Image: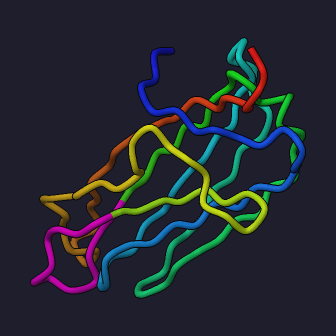
């Protein structure tokens, strides 16, 4: 799997936090998967992001286990307000209470978002590779 976004991890801290935020009036379902470098699955989560809410997911994992591994997320989004058809999806990774350094931010402008009332969604997938500082 070719992934252009890189996330630098501190090898001393086994605790990660994922924060996800959406523009007001949007709701989402998101599946997040964490893989080893050999593409074997480590963990996966399915999360709901209610309207006007930020969510946080705490993860306990040894950084060396995910060195050169990757995180993939697939989101489905709809709007609670029929007048809102675009918005921003933002995800941040935190370690030791500090945002992790990424080669490019995880912020996506999502357009063409249908109203939830018609039971349709817009879907997107993205990913990043983990690199532990000081490891090869």
Q: Residue at x 41, y 25 (%)?
A: 4
Q: Residue at x 46, y 23 (%)?
A: 3
Q: Residue 109 magenta-drawn?
A: no
Task: Please name the colour scheme applied to the rendered image.
Answer: rainbow
Q: Residue 78 magenta-drawn?
A: yes
* Total tally of numbered discs in the picture: 0
Horizontally, residue 46 falls left or right of residue 42, namely left
Horizontally, residue 52 falls left or right of residue 31, namely left
Instruction: Give residue 93's quadrant in the image.
Output: bottom right
Magenta-tinted stretch = 77-88
Give residue 57's position: percent from left, percent from top. 70, 65
Give residue 52's position: percent from left, percent from top. 41, 87
Q: Nearer the viewer, residue 132 or 116?
A: 132
Horizontally, residue 116 falls left or right of residue 68, namely left
Question: Is 96 located above or below residue 80 in the figure?
Answer: above
Question: Is 41 located above or below residue 123 in the figure?
Answer: above
Question: Is 8 located above or below residue 38 in the figure?
Answer: below
Q: Residue at x 29, y 54 (%)?
A: 108
Q: Residue at x 77, y 26 (%)?
A: 134
Q: Nearer the viewer, residue 117 or 133?
A: 133
Question: Is 61 located above or below residue 28 in the figure?
Answer: above
Give residue 130's position: percent from left, percent from top. 64, 32
- In the rendered image, the quadrant that contains the C terminus is top right
Give residue 14's position: percent from left, percent from top. 88, 49
């Amino acid at each position: 799997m070719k992934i252009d976004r890189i996330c630098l991890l501190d090898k001393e801290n086994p605790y990660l936090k994922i924060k996800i935020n959406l523009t007001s009036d949007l709701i989402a379902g998101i599946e997040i998967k964490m893989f080893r470098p050999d593409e074997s699955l480590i963990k996966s989560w399915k999360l709901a992001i209610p309207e006007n809410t930020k969510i946080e997911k705490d993860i306990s994992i040894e950084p060396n286990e995910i060195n050169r591994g990757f995180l993939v997320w697939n989101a489905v989004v709809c709007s609670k307000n029929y007048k809102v058809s675009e918005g921003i999806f933002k995800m941040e990774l935190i370690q030791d209470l500090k945002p992790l350094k990424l080669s490019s931010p995880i912020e996506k402008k999502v357009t063409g978002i249908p109203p939830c009332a018609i039971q349709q969604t817009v879907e997107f997938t993205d990913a990043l590779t983990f690199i532990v500082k000081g490891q090869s």
